[in-house]
Amino acid sequence: MKLCKHCGDDIVDRSSTAEYCCSTCQQEASFEKYRKLNPGKGNLSPGIAGGRNELKACTDLIEKGYEIFRNVCQCGSCDLIALKKGRLLKVEVASGTLSENGNINCSMHDPDNYDIIAAVTHDKICYKNGEGNEIELREVNESLKGGRIEK
Ligand SMILES: [Zn+2]
C-alpha cells in the first residue's frame, strides 16, 4: 500500500504515480515547499516589504560598486538609479519568489520604465533585463545603451 507523502494515509483509488491521497494534501504540500523556499514571505504588509526590498537592493548594488539614488516619491517610473563609471541604470525593485528549480520569479513591470529589475527574496537578489532573463550586472554595463553617458 502506498502512503500519502503529506498526511501518511493510504492512497486509494489513485494511479500508481500519485504521491498524495487527495488534492488538499497535494496543495498543502505545495504550500509547504513554497514556505520553506520563501520563509517569511507574506509576513510583512506589501508597503513595508517593498521598502525593505528596496533597501536590500541598495545594499547589494552599493557592494557591487554603484552609487545609488532612491526615488523620493512613493510612485514613480522606477525605484532606484544606479550610477557607476558615468553610466546610469534605471532599477525597478520587485519581490522575488524562489522556485524549486532555483529560479527567482517576480511579477513583470513595464520594461520601458527600467533597465533592470532587482528581484529580491529573503536571502538572494537576482537581476533581470526587460525580457525577464537573468543577467549579471557586468553584462548590463557592457550591453545596455540606455542611460549611457560615456563609453
Ligand atoms: Zn494525504
Image (spheres, helix red, strand yellow):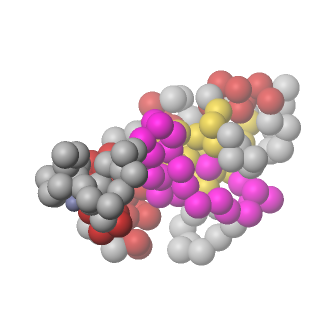
Image-quadrant location for residue 41: bottom left
Q: Nearer the viewer, residue 65 or 118?
A: 118
Determine if residue 142 is in view.
yes
Determine if residue 116 is in view.
no
Tell me which segment is drawn in magenta.
94-117
x and y percentages locating residue 57 in the rendered image: 47, 46
Q: Residue furthest left?
A: 8
| Quadrant position of ligand 1 | bottom left
Q: Nearer the viewer, residue 42 or 76?
A: 42
Q: Judge from the rendering whether residue 4 lies leftward or rightward of residue 116; answer left or right.
A: left
Image-quadrant location for residue 114: bottom right
x and y percentages locating residue 38 in the rendered image: 33, 51
Q: Judge from the rendering whether residue 20 lies leftward or rightward of residue 98; answer left or right.
A: left
Q: Which residue is depicted at the point 41% across and 73% down?
A: 47
Q: Which residue is depicted at the point 51% across and 29% down?
A: 64
Q: Which residue is depicted at the point 47% across and 52% down?
A: 96
For the C terminus, the quadrant is top right
**Total numbered badges shown on the rendered structure:** 0
Q: Nearer the viewer, residue 107 or 21?
A: 21
In the rendered image, the vertical position of residue 84 relative to residue 33, given as above or below: above
Q: Judge from the rendering whether residue 129 lies leftward or rightward of residue 60; answer left or right.
A: right
Is 114 contained in the magenta span? Answer: yes
x and y percentages locating residue 102 in the rendered image: 46, 36
x and y percentages locating residue 73 in the rendered image: 56, 73
